[in-house]
């Protein structure tokens, strides 16, 4: 018998909750997102796309077309793996992007987040280790914690995971899979160096470990040369998780997994229990939008906007922040990663920032062991240029009073 | 070290898949749904609503309104628990239906299917028992099998679970939760008698067990008097899983959990890892449709249609089927449940039915132990009246040649 869950009122007080569920912490970002709606607040906390860039009219037209021509199919149940024409369209995009794929390699998911969970459930038992970057995506830790996973954490520098340190960890902890966000990482914005990509793929092959490459940001490159993805380099050794969230809309919850058919067959059985299938309506809307051929231009528009915002944020940080604060300067994605002098706490800084009406996410929740409290993440995609200017001013004030 | 998964090609051949995933069977219905698209095939297999009844124009208008007035919110990330105005509207409907609720009792899910999984993960560890009806919903077994659950199965008669047999099973197997489809059950169409509802709630309270009442069909009552739901009777002892799938559209994947706030707080943490949130767009479309006040009338229209179809199916069955075949006559829902003489196999009958171009689902997958192969499920909501007439003719031919 496990002890009853402590916060429960009668009669559920006496219900036995599984230990894994009981120990799950509320999301670190949830409360911040509530605070973000406070009048006058400027938020650099969430990883939200710029709402003013959503192609609302185009997606409205796509939805209209779907209702007019395939309304009944859009509203009916559909297959767990995803609608075949969408899987074909996604496979074609992947192939153009350098990852040779057919529809058999594609499974539609309810956002890339679901891809993370499906892969976690496929490969990880409670107590198993996962090899990850340190820090890593907090939403992946949320999934993996719920499965009872443990972490073999590989340190990062400005060129991504220090892969040379990974082999010793693999030998010691025998992880069941490798989870990375190799390009414009969440939270750091850092991209893994080419040589390290090759090294990591070789290591995965040597130890027969799947690499789960969570790649929501790959197409949001503002500058520099694109690198081949891990999936491109490692082919069947790598499972790619992708999504329309950052390049089109997160509210429609349409992502995909790129993997071998045998892996997708098992993932499909788990997904069927999870949600039967991803919304037929939303899959058809995405497909209709893809047919317009506008996505490529839309992504270019996003990249121009985010580059401006990134530059504005960095320029203002240089003017307002004390010299002791350092940060990454990513060539794409949504995030900057900041480091305070090691004796300072970003969690404490957040309290002062909230008093100044500006929000960010402290770094701690991105570390499986909750260390490195002197780091924090800034999102530059969601706020407007004037909010970025004003928000960095406020944050500079909070930091200067604090350093 | 676990043995490598057997069907895998290089290099994933050597990956270690968790035992639970490896043992998951493909859905029994998946292949049937593929067969259902074969030209000339008449399918009574899936639990699909009648597509001709979907309010396509009304939902198109709702979507248009959402894009025109809240396009950016519809396309943006939203909160895991669900949009507050939708939770309020759902709580109001629940209260009108007799379940006193506020938005704090409601969590939006990606279909009721996700509610099953969230509750399974909240209460069930691998090896734990779940008390269920025998037979029970195959999609719930899919979830629970993936969690490594075992089953304490309570026999049913035409008045639902024989609750008097449940207590001994609770004492013997110490289940962690009770999962039932108390009204117009999937697969049998049977509704639990009033006295048994009270008995089951009392039992759940006595043993401090949560009842998960999966209730997608409650509002589809064609005849007879409505019974109070388990949730209405048991209040906080019962967790209700509901959905818009059967009363509006399954393709939009919007359902909800009705439970105490403390349970929903934990469920929210698990759901956040699973898919972050249910599509903002689809939640807003449902909300907009609810505002028109048309749902009540729409449900009445569905009930009239399904009653006609049920009657047509039963009338034709009486004409075509041998006397040895018996069936349930449900007052609502989507399904009839048929029983062949005990020496006959519905799995074998299905082969003959396929040859006649008609489909149903054999009963075996609905039994955790895979027994009772002389039973099968017929869906009457999806096919047209003329297809029902012709399909039952064909099935009668197959059965007669077989009995």
Image (spheres, coloured by chain):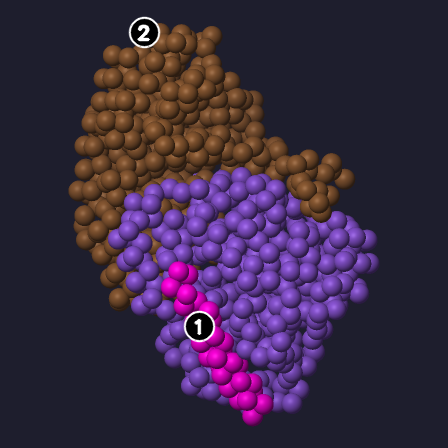
Chain colours: A brown, B purple
Q: Position of residue B119 (x, y in %)?
A: 60, 49
Q: Secondary structure at mark 2?
A: loop
Residue at x 51%, y 57% (from the top left corner): B92
Q: Position of residue A83 (x, y in %)?
A: 36, 58
Q: Which residues are magenta?
A: B290-319
Whether label 2 touches label 1, CB < 8 Å: no
Circle 2: is it few (<14), some (14-19), or many (20+) Cα within 10 Å?
A: few
Q: Secondary structure at mark 1?
A: helix
Residue at x 21%, y 51% (from the top left corner): A57
* Residue labelled with disc 1: B297
Circle 1: is it few (<14), some (14-19), or many (20+) Cα within 10 Å?
A: few
Image position of B308 (left or right of A249) = right
Image position of B362 (left or right of B211) = left
* Residue labelled with disc 2: A323
Residue at x 68%, y 42% (from the top left corner): A9
| Residue nearer the viewer, B157 or A313 | A313
Chain letter for the residue marked with disc 1 in the picture: B
């Amino acid at each position: 018998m496990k002890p009853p869950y402590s916060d429960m009122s009668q009669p559920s007080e006496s219900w036995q909750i599984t230990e894994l569920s009981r120990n799950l912490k509320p999301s670190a970002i949830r409360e911040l997102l509530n605070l973000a709606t406070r009048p006058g607040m400027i938020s650099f906390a969430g990883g939200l796309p710029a709402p003013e860039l959503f192609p609302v009219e185009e997606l409205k037209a796509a939805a209209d077309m779907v209702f007019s021509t395939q309304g009944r199919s859009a509203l009916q149940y559909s297959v767990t793996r995803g609608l075949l024409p969408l899987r074909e369209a996604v496979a074609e995009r992947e192939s153009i992007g350098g990852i040779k794929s057919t529809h058999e390699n594609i499974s539609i998911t309810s956002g890339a987040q679901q891809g993370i969970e499906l892969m976690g459930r496929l490969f990880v038992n409670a107590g198993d280790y996962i090899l990850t970057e340190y820090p890593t995506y907090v939403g992946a830790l949320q999934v993996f914690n719920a499965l009872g996973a443990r972490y073999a954490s590989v340190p990062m520098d400005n060129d991504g995971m220090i892969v040379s340190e990974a082999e010793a960890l693999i030998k010691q902890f025998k992880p069941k899979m490798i989870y990375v966000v190799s390009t414009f990482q969440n939270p750091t914005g850092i991209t893994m160096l080419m040589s390290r990509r090759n090294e990591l793929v070789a290591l995965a092959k040597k130890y027969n470990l799947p690499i789960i490459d969570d790649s929501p940001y790959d197409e949001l490159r503002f500058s520099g040369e694109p690198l081949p993805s891990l999936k491109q380099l490692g082919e069947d050794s790598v499972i790619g998780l992708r999504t329309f969230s950052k390049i089109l809309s997160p509210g429609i919850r349409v992502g995909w997994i790129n993997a071998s058919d045998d892996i997708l067959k098992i993932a499909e059985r788990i997904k069927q229990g999870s949600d039967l299938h991803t919304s037929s309506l939303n899959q058809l809307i995405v497909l209709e939008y893809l047919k317009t051929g506008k996505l490529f231009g839309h992504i270019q528009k996003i990249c121009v906007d985010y580059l401006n915002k990134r530059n504005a944020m960095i320029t203002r940080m240089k003017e307002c922040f004390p010299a002791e604060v350092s940060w990454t300067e990513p060539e794409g994605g949504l995030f900057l990663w900041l480091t305070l002098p090691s004796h300072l706490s970003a969690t404490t800084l957040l309290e002062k920032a909230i008093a100044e009406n500006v929000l960010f996410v402290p770094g701690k929740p991105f570390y499986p062991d909750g260390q490195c409290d002197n780091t924090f993440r800034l999102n530059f995609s969601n706020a407007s240029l004037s909010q970025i200017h004003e928000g960095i001013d406020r944050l500079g004030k909070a930091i200067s009073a604090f350093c």
